[in-house]
Amino acid sequence: MEILTCIKQVPGTSEVEVDEKTGVLKRDGVDSKMNPYDLYALETALRIKQEKGATLKVITMGPPQAKQIIEESFMMGVDEGAIVSDRKFAGADVLATSYTLSQGIKKAGNPDLIICGKQTTDGDTAQVGPEIAEFLNIPHVTNVTKIIEVKDEAIVVEVDMPNTLEVCEIQYPCLITVEKGIFQPRLPSFKLGLKTKDRDIQMYSLKDFEDQNENNYGLNGSPTQVLRIFPPASNNEKEILRGSAEETTDILVGKLKDLKLV
C-alpha cells in the first residue's frame, strides 16, 4: 500500500506583505512553518502506515526552501518526499495549484490513498484536496473526523456533515481530507532527524510533467483574477473613561451611537 500526504509551507506570522499588483503574498524573508492542518493529515497517514506496513510519501508545491518541511516530515517517519517547484507555477490560484499538484502526484506514482489537511492557514479555501481528486479522477471525502477501518481494498471513515455524522467506505485509489483533532500530531524525532539528514528529496518542474502546456499553470492557468488585495489596517486607538458608573455608561452609549453600533 502506498500513501501520499500533501503538505504546504505557510507563513509563520500574520505580518505578511501583499503584492498589490498580483495579489500574491510576499513570502521572501518571512519565517515559515508547516501548515498546522497538514500535521493532522501526516499523523493520520503515519498511523495507517504503521498499521498496514505502507510506504508514506509527502509532496509540496513551493520554492526550494520548502524542503524544510519535507525534512521535518522525515523526522516524523515519512519515507519519501518531493517538491513541485518552477517559476512558471508562481501566482497560481486554487484551481491551478490543484492541477499542478495532481501532475506532481502522477509523477510520484499515483498512490492508493491521498490524505490532505482540511485547509491551509494562508488560504482557508478548503478546495485543494477535492480539486486534486477531480483532476486525478478518483473518489474523495472531506471533513473526515475518524478512521474506522483500513481494509485491503477500501477505507472506512466517519464524516462530519452539517447536521449528521456519516460513515463512508471508499475504494482505492481515493483521497480524504481530515479535520483538526482527528489525532494528536507527534513531535519530530531527533534520532530520525540524524538518520534521514542525507535523504534525497525529489524536485519536479514543468519539464517533468506529462502536461507541459504553460497555459495550465501559475497565473496563466488561474481563472480567478484578484482585483485588489490588501492587509487590514490596524487600529490601536484607545480611550479610558473615568467617572461614576452612570457617567461612564452615558459616555459609552453616546460613543456607540456615534459609531452607529446601536
Image (cartoon, rainbow, N blue to C red):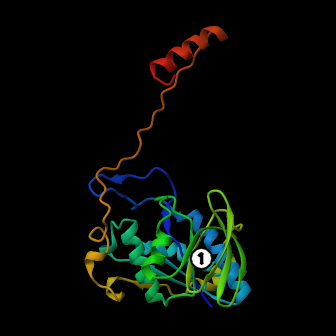
Dot 1: what SS? Answer: helix
**Viewer-closest of 66 and 182:** 182
Q: Quadrant of residue 104?
A: bottom left
* Marker count (numbered): 1
Residue lying at 56% horizontally and 17% vertically, measured from the top left: 252
**Viewer-closest of 255 and 73:** 255
Q: Quadrant of residue 182?
A: bottom right
Q: Which residue carries the number 1 mark? A: 73
**Viewer-closest of 146 and 30:** 146
Q: Amino acid at mark 1?
A: Ser
State whether residue 76 appears in this view: no
Q: Quadrant of residue 225?
A: bottom left
**Viewer-closest of 72 and 261:** 261
Residue 104 sits above or below residue 163 on the image: below
Give how far across and how far down residue 218 sits, in percent. Answer: 31, 71
Residue lying at 37% horizontally and 58% vertically, measured from the top left: 26
State whether residue 208 appears in this view: yes
Q: Locate residue 126 relative to residue 185 in the image: left or right.
A: left
Residue 11 sits above or below residue 217 on the image: above
Give how far across and how far down residue 211 sits, in percent. Answer: 32, 85
Residue 228 sits above or below residue 251 on the image: below
Residue 67 sits above or below residue 252 on the image: below
Query: Which quadrant of the rendered structure holds the N terminus?
Result: bottom right
Residue lying at 45% horizontally and 33% vertically, measured from the top left: 235
Instruction: Answer few, some or many: residues within 10 Å of disc 1's Cα (few below 14, many 20 plus, some between 14 and 19).
Output: many
Give how far across and how far down residue 6 sits, in percent. Answer: 52, 75
Q: Locate residue 104 relative to residue 180 in the image: left or right.
A: left
Q: Locate residue 146 relative to residue 232 in the image: left or right.
A: right
Residue lying at 47% horizontally and 66% vertically, measured from the top left: 127
